[in-house]
Image (cartoon, coloured by chain):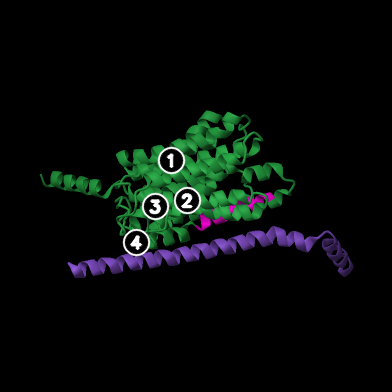
Amino acid sequence: MLFSWLSGNQDSLETITLGILTYNTIAFGLQPIFGYIADTYKNIPIAAIGCMLLIIGLLFIKYPWAALSIMGIGNACFHVGGGIDSLKYSNGKMARSGIFVSSGALGVSLGGLAGKSTMIPLYLPVVLLILCLIAISIFSSPDSDKQYKAPDFKISNPIHSFGMIIALCFFSIVIRSYAGSIIPMDWKTTMFLSVLPSIGACVGKASGGILADRLGARNVGVFSLLASVPCLVFGHGFPWICFIGILLFNMSMSITLCTIASLLPSNPGLAFGITTLALLCGSVPMFFFTVPEASIVIAVLTILSSILLYQAVINHKEKENEKNIQNYEQQIL
Amino acid sequence: MKKIFKTMNNKFFDFGGPFLLLFLFGIPIALIIVIIALIVLTVHLIKKAKKKSSEKKDSDVTKQ
């Protein structure tokens, strides 16, 4: 809806930019508040409310600012609902939340293409949202466990305090969000190539969670960020090298989310909201100024983000303890 | 010098300078204020959530 308004209207570039910023601020910035409300009042079907608000927003399509605001709130509610669900039933694994956050990048990209196309009728998103509502009512289990808790992922670094780890994760996401938004991609000339970065982000986010469960959160998070640097700095002009860079760059997404969630086990909604607020903070500067040497900035920021992640996360508490015990036993023997 | 400044100032106003300035600096400032307010609110919510969970832990320990 937003993209069709952008491509079709006669407004100035400033108005359009303001539209995107307003939408992002509502959709990403309000998630901590909605998350906290959903954590406190567990009976609220927040994801379903989000879908309904998105349908209502579509009805106001002739009034873009009203539609933007309603749909921004709807988006925030839907994501909080999905985020809570993905953390609550994760069973201590990062894969589930990684898969949940992965589809967003692809959705934004496909939405952009749909908005540019004149072939897609307005009823299509309404039908999709109704299907989404039906799926939520069928597959989401009624909350019998009123005192739900997100399981402890056991990956937060015990050396640092509660506030320090949240701050480290928050700034790691902010830096990553900004660095990700300034990657120069002049090769996005065809439809496939314009979707390619989103496919990379989607695969990266999903595989990051799965690999982190198997190989350790710190290993995967730090290595993937550092490995993405040469691909993005030297290969941003080549679609497939840049694709690999974006894939690696996005792998740490679920790791930071699960680290914050493990610190706030009774508030998975708030934990999810903190990460989206950080994403918003990182994306805002892109709207106001451009950097002349983007490659160098990306390299510096990505390395900085990986250092923050290294400080905030460990591989797995129990496995680390097992290793320490083994080392101790070997030393004694 | 005063004359040059006055002419420049008039031109600035004729061009719609204040509105341009308000647009260029007003929106980022407003946005930054909104985002700072959201961060402050989130920090408050985190503190509240942590306090609640520690209270709950204490009560669980007392029950046991």
> Considering depth in this image, is A67 or B10 the residue closer to the camera?
A67
Q: Which residues are magenta?
A: A16-30
- Asked whether, in this view, residue A270 is left or right of residue A70, the answer is left
Secondary element type, mark 3: helix
Q: CA distance from mark 2 to mark 3?
A: 10 Å
Q: Is residue A133 left or right of residue A332?
A: right
Expressed as whole percent of the image width and height from the top left, the position of residue A302 reads 48, 45
Q: Which chain is purple?
A: B
Residue bearing the label numbered 1: A205
Q: Amino acid at mark 2?
A: Phe
Label 4 environment density (alpha carbons within 10 Å; few <14, some 14–19, many ≥20): few
Which label belongs to residue A78?
A: 2
Is A328 included in the stretch rendered in magenta? no
Q: CA distance from mark 1 to mark 2?
A: 19 Å
Which residue corresponds to mark 4? Answer: A161
Residue A246 drawn at (x, y percent): 49, 37
For residue A94, say whether it is visible.
yes
Please tell me whether residue B59 is drawn above or below residue A79 in the rendered image. Answer: below
Residue plotted at (61% across, 52% down)? A68
Identify the element where label 4 is drawn: loop
Quadrant in the picture for the N terminus of chain A: top right
Chain for mark 1? A
First in sequence: mark 4 vs mark 1: 4
Which residue is denoted by mark 3 in the rendering?
Answer: A84
Q: Quadrant of the C terminus of chain A?
A: top left
Disc 3 from disc 1: Cα separation = 17 Å
